[in-house]
Amino acid sequence: MRPRVPWMNEVDDAILEFLDEADVDDQPIALKPGAVHYNLVEEFEMVDKSLSTFSRKMARLAKNGYLEKTEEGKGSPYKITDKGRAYLAGELDADNIE
């Protein structure tokens, strides 16, 4: 099991896993919180959280290096980072997780 910090929960994992699997030709794609929310809640029914929860979670994941914001401004797209992929693979030591 991969280590988590107290602010992370199943929503964080679902967001990271979705963006990790959403590569195109081995390149990470960037999606806005609304698109991630729609796919995880409406299409796949994986988690039952609000769009504002997804927006907050994605901003915090970006602040801590797991996602990268691709533009400035509210509602901008995010893509997964190498750190986000390392977290999913269980390659981060608990001491390296913020």
Image: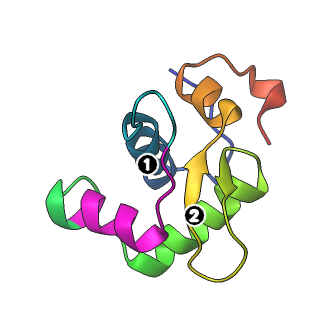
Tell me which segment is drawn in magenta.
Answer: 29-41
Residue occupying the far front of the picture: 25
- In magenta segment, residue 75: no
On screen, residue 37 versus residue 43, left or right, reads right
Q: Residue at x 69, y 61 (%)?
A: 60
Considering only order in the chain, which callout, 1 or 2, is on the residue closer to the N terminus? 1
Looking at the rendered image, the quarter that the C terminus falls into is top right
Q: Where is residue 41 in the image (x, y as percent from the top left)?
A: 25, 64
Secondary-structure class at tag 2: helix
Q: Can residue 33 be found in the magenta stretch?
A: yes
Indicate the position of residue 42 as horizontal and vertical percent values: 18, 67
Q: Mark 2 points at which residue?
A: 57
Identify residue type, mark 1.
Glu
Give the residue at mark 1. Answer: 10
Please determine whether, in this image, residue 11 is positioned above or below residue 37.
above
Residue 51, above or below 93: below
Depth order, front residue of 29/50: 29
Q: Residue at x 67, y 31 (%)?
A: 82
What's under tag 2, amino acid-wise?
Lys
From the viewer's side, name the closer residue of 61 and 71: 71
Spatial separation of the CA atoms under disc 2 and disc 1: 11 Å
Label 1 crowd (10 A; few <14 / some 14-19 / many >=20):
few
Helix, strand or loop at disc 1?
A: helix
